[in-house]
Image: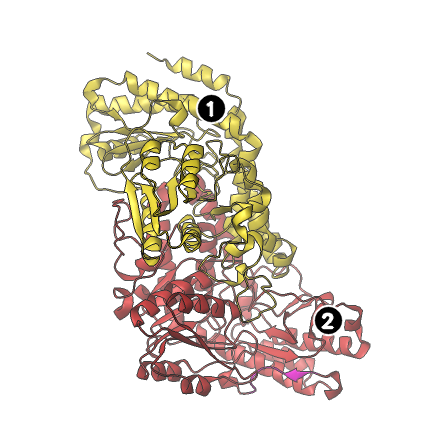
Chain colours: A red, B yellow
Amino acid sequence: MISRQQAIELDESDALADFRDRFVITDPDLIYLDGNSLGRLPKATVDRVRATMAEEWGDGLVRSWRSGWMAEPGSVGARLAPLIGADPDEVLLTDQTSLNLYKLASAALAHQAPRSTVLTDSGNFPSDIYVLSGVAGAAGGSVRMVGADPVAPSTSAIEAALDDQVGLVSLSHVNFKSGALLDMSSITTAAHEAGAMVLWDLSHSVGAVPIDLRGSGVDLAVGCTYKYLNGGPGSPAFLYVARHLQDTLVQPIHGWWGQEDMFGFGLEYEPAPGMDRFATGTMPILSLAGAGVGIDLTAEAGIDRIRSKSVALTSLIVDLFDELPAGYGFSLGSPRDDGVRGSHVSLRHPDGYRITQALIERNVIPDFRAPDVVRLGAAALYTRFVDVWDAFERLREIMESGAHEEFTDERSGVT
Amino acid sequence: MISRQQAIELDESDALADFRDRFVITDPDLIYLDGNSLGRLPKATVDRVRATMAEEWGDGLVRSWRSGWMAEPGSVGARLAPLIGADPDEVLLTDQTSLNLYKLASAALAHQAPRSTVLTDSGNFPSDIYVLSGVAGAAGGSVRMVGADPVAPSTSAIEAALDDQVGLVSLSHVNFKSGALLDMSSITTAAHEAGAMVLWDLSHSVGAVPIDLRGSGVDLAVGCTYKYLNGGPGSPAFLYVARHLQDTLVQPIHGWWGQEDMFGFGLEYEPAPGMDRFATGTMPILSLAGAGVGIDLTAEAGIDRIRSKSVALTSLIVDLFDELPAGYGFSLGSPRDDGVRGSHVSLRHPDGYRITQALIERNVIPDFRAPDVVRLGAAALYTRFVDVWDAFERLREIMESGAHEEFTDERSGVT
């Protein structure tokens, strides 16, 4: 049996231990295992957003657009770029993930005509599947969906489903339920050999898993900044377009922020060169400021150190799961192999919803995902090994006492 | 000649004078006449955003989605509704103006098939024209553009251009350059008689001009919250869909925030009933908090009192323009008739760009709009009559001394 002392010793040798102090933590007893849904508040964000309000907005007023804000979608994107293996001029912070997916998937299918099938798997985030279905339908095609194995990446099944009708392959790098990590390089190569483009959703991997978009030859990617990047609730998402495609693709929402000379106010849309053409309208600057702080903090910690700790944390979760009595009725909903697992682990249980409620009552915050998944996220910048150990101790108390049976099963959650 | 004392007396009898103290004003000498581009920072926003960070995000963490954030696009929209003559369940705060225009114009044209012409005027905001051209083109149609008179509303020309090919009429309620105010009711009625739907962009009228969407029979509307509503840089925009159309129209971006049961995570898109189907992804909560404060402040002041002061301010601008020596070379780029003028006045001058630079150097902030417009915005909540008088005094000094000739003409601006 793994002891609490062993967990404490893991924390004592944790190279990232000091980063926990960089976050606002109001309740030391709270065990927060949902940083993969909404990351914690960095202390620096409080100061940065306050300065954005007081100095840039309050004092600088409209002048701040020219002195800084207008460049931020690109400059914050450039700071994110090293975390995903992109060049600084290949990333833009703008809009939301579903919107960016819509823009890039539409642009890709227009480029790939007459190919109009979008290939994905059933473990892709449902919003992505909705967006892709709409985009494919508008292009006269449809989505082809490979079944996702609940505990293993569907890499080979996806590759086997490629043919000459597929114009675009679009997948979540890490499955939002199982945490299964797809082989980006292999799928991208196979898609290209079949004549398809590839669009990755990095929402559940960015800031947790090393990503090499350029090395993998990826065409397009999107992702959010409010999970492992700690950008804040609904902070702007990002999009990536490989440089050689930037001046070829045209996205369908022709807003002025994508216009070549936006202040020339000509009446014809002339898409800007480079990444700017993938922008649409004015960005929410307070929320964008938060995204920048979270990205910088992640870059400072270093993605390799983060991944190393993340693997150790999720391995501890798997080990503690293995020690649970079989009679509790849990099954593992995530890959056992560290190499194909992102930064969260899912425990499946028929009473998963009620168990989640009981954990929350005991000051442990996991996430519930219908129909039966208790999702435990390991955000390396502030999650301690002892937090994971204590969470399992509280889980044991619940299962021993049947405390979860006091709750009613009303379905809910946030990704 | 209007004296400075007369302006001071107007301020002394200003029913809204106290509202100026509700804003952060760091430089008392600065004359800010660009609140129609970016409104000032309300003091309450500083506190509200700080609480959103510290209490809702930092302490509440992911729980705050359920305890408040998820409802905010609708609840802030409901607070905006009275300002535009809508019912509370007809308005949603979400995304940006160009995106909302794209969603609603696409939904309208799909509904109006085979009609695929979009009617607008050349005074519409260029981003709107770009979006509409893209949407019409995707539907196999095009934009029909009526020329906008530089100093008068193009209401009758628009009505005359209606025919049975027009599926949608989409216009800016107030022209971003001239400030000309279109007759919403008349155009909407004429469009309906011709079988077209109507989509208004209220960006330059909301919070400054009384708007009666329901009374005018308007189908659809969008607008921003960062101008007269003082929501903050890039704060989320709004969209309005008349109740009887909400369950009929389907917008093309099928994100999970528009899904009927977003946490059921089904794999088929089922658009939510009511306004929710016009949402796409996760909203930027810090920026949304700012929008809510600005809307509440405007509602507290009351749109009729705001309009009354706004008309007095823009009338003073026109009167002071009339007193400028003809030799200065200005012409009026806005309607003289208060009844068809929004809340800004444009002065045209061949050296408009350089004059704008000279005004900024003298701590007066107007906006420049190519090719020759010096735009003076009158935000009633914090602009004083004496500010307008002093701005003209500084303008006279510039024209007398030729100070603007020291500047080079590099074109720029922000809407």
Instruction: Indicate which disc residue A354 carries.
Output: 2
As shown in the figure, which amino acid type bears the numbered disc 2?
A: Arg
Residue nearest the observer in this picture, B28 or B31: B31
Instruction: Indicate which disc residue B214 carries.
Output: none
Pointer 2: residues within 10 angstroms few (<14), some, or many (20+)? many
Q: SS of the residue at dot 1?
A: helix
Q: SS of the residue at dot 2?
A: helix
The quarter of the displayed image where residue A92 is located: bottom left
Residue nearest the observer in this picture, B240 or A272: B240
Would residue B57 appear left or right of B382 to someone viewing this image? right
Residue B121 vs A97, above or below: the answer is above
According to the picture, the residue beneath numbered tag 1 turns out to be: B309
Between the residue at mark 1 and the residue at mark 2, the CA separation in whole angstroms equals 57 Å
Residue B202 visible in the current orientation: no
Residue B5 vs B236, above or below: the answer is above
Residue B135 vs B218, above or below: the answer is below
Q: Which residues are magenta?
A: A330-336
Which residue is pictured at 53% across the width and 36% down the height? B85
Which residue is pictured at 41% across the width and 64% down the height? A102
Q: State the quadrant of the N terminus of chain B.
A: top left
Pointer 1: residues within 10 angstroms few (<14), some, or many (20+)? many
Name the residue furthest top: B1
> Mark 1 falls within which chain?
B
Q: How many marks?
A: 2
